[in-house]
Image (cartoon, rainbow, N blue to C red):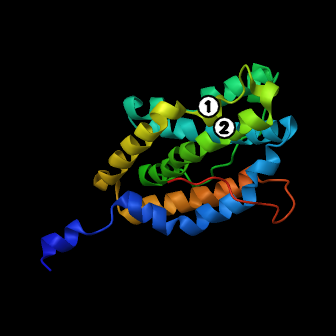
Amino acid sequence: MSGAAHASAAPSLSERLREETRDRHEDLEHRLDWRRRMATREGYLALLTRWWGFHRVFEPAIAASFEPAFAQPRGKLHLLERDLVHFGLTKDTIEALPRFAAGTGFHSRPALLGALYVTEGSTLGGQVIAHHLHRSLGAEIASGGCAYYEGYGKRDTGAMWASFRTFLDRSGEEGPPHHVIEGARWTFDALKLWLTAGLPPDSGRAEPSQR
C-alpha cells in the first residue's frame, strides 16, 4: 500500500473522538439516568439548572477563543435561560445558581474543541429527549420549557452536527489531535460529576446517543 493510500485510510479526528471517548461517553450516559430524572418537573428543572451552570462558564470561554461566526450560533445559554424563566425563575435567581468550576479544563483551543465535540454531539440525543419530555411532562412544557433540548430543531440539528464535524476534521492547525481528544474525555468526566452531583451511587441508565 502506498503512503498516499495509507494516509487516505487514516481515521478522521471526529472518528477518532467517537472511538477514543466511547468509554467516557457511555459512563456519563449510564450515570445520568435521564428518564428517571426527568420524570418529574422538579427533577427536570434541577437538571436544567446544572446545565445552565456549565454553559455559564463554558460559553464565555468559547466566545473568547473562536470567531463569533462559529461560536455564536452554537450558544445554548439563552435557551436554558428561556426554559428556566418558563419555570418561574427570575433573572437574579438564575444568575445566583451554582456555576461549573472549569479549573484547567478549558485552557486551550484544542481542549475547548474537544469540549464542543461533547456539547454539539449532545444535541443529537437532545432531540430524543425533547420528544420524551413532551410526552412525559405534557402540560408543564406545552407553552415552553424545552428550548434547550429542542436545540437547533429537527430540521437543523443534523446539519449543524455535520458542519461541526467538518470544522473539526479540518482543524489540524489547532494542535495535536490528542489534545482535542483529551479535552473531550475531560469534559465527559467533568459533566458526569457536575450533572449527577447529589445522586445516589450508580443510579444511572443510558441517555440516547446517536453520534
- The residue that disc 2 covers is 131
Dot 2 crowding, Cα within 10 Å, few <14, some 14–19, many 20+: few
Q: Is residue 104 above or below residue 54?
A: below
Residue 109's x, y, as percent?
43, 49
Query: At x 75% / y 35%, what residue is drawn?
Result: 135
* Horizontal side, residue 180 vs residue 132: left or right: left
Residue 133's spot in the image, x, y percent?
A: 73, 37
Looking at the image, is mark 2 or mark 1 nearer the viewer? 2
Q: Position of residue 120 (x, y in %)?
A: 51, 44
Sequence-earlier tag: 2 or 1: 1
Residue 55 shows in this picture: yes
Which residue is rendered at x = 15% and y = 80% of the image?
1
Give SS at disc 2.
helix
Return the x and y of residue 114 as percentages of the image width and height. Answer: 48, 54
Amino acid type at mark 1? Leu
Badge 1 marks a residue whose secondary structure is: helix
